[in-house]
Image (spheres, rainbow, N blue to C red):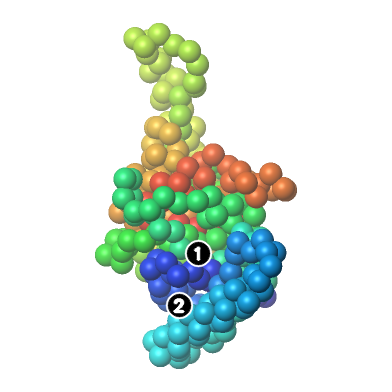
Amino acid sequence: MNDTITVGVTGAPVAERAIRWAVARAASRRQRLELVGVVGGALGAVGEDAVVEDALAATRDLLEAHAESVRAAAPEVPVSVRAEAGDPVRLLIEASTRSALLVIGSDYRGPGDGPDRGAHGVRIAAGASCPVVVVPDFDTEERSGVVVGIDGSAVSEHALRFAAAEADRLGEPLVAVSVWTPLSAPRNSLAVYPELYLENMQAATEEVLALALAGIASDYPDLVVERRVERGYPSQVLNGIAKDARLAVVGTHGRGALARFLLGSISQEVLERLATVTAVVR
């Protein structure tokens, strides 16, 4: 079984947060780290080779500096570095095939704050072969709880298992969230849903959540589980709850070439409005 946590490292300040998160996880799970830096943007212009070599050397120096910090803080965690030139999305997706977990940073700091983000994080999470953890550029250490979205699918079962293991590792409560959304159709703004319909939607979703959680107590007898069944739009509800959590976990159904660009509306929307450290599991 692969025990490597791969961390995509850039020169952005959030890289240090991503590394710290990965180190804590590696230390508690007895895993090893590989810090990967990618020099991208080469076009093949005349004289570019020297520029790329200089950039690779600077990247190796940056990675080695981070690795030395890891060795000083957590000497029990084996750490290696790798600097490559090419497309960062492709190379990190390739690295995920050799990894138990891929950790990347996001410079997102909340609505209206921080620099604009590109699509790299979403594309990496969509195409990766292993779970991807996206670490935002703000502190989450004082928060509590691990939030997981559950919809009754096989993918959400994988997300639940990942979330339960992380909550147990962290000694945090698991907040299992299922969201139901009333039927969408062109309606008169004054129209109302029948109360029986709303009650049945709530009850059906509660049943889905109960079935999903049926085996968790036996696997994690000390784990505190909070059940939340909410009406609303899934990504908004999940991010609203996750803003007070240490970790959020969502599943993705993404497969094939298209999945590299489209993560799935709910998981993609969760990442685009990152509320906390977020794991994407398939």
Residue at horizontal 55 percent and vertical 54 percent from the top: 120
Q: x%, y% of residue 247?
A: 40, 59
Towards the viewer: 125 or 218: 125
The amino acid pointed to by label 2 is Val
Above or below residue 264? Residue 29 is below
Q: CA distance from mark 1 to mark 2?
A: 13 Å
Label 1 sits on residue = 104
Residue beneath label 2, please? 23
Residue drawn at (45%, 51%) of the image: 117
Q: Residue at x 58, y 69 (%)?
A: 39
Residue at (64% x, 54% y) in the render: 127
User: Split into 4 quadrants, where in the image is the N terminus?
Assistant: bottom right
Q: Residue furthest left?
A: 142
Q: Earlier in the sequence, mark 1 or mark 2?
A: 2
The extreme right residue here reads 256
Res. 114 visible in picture:
yes
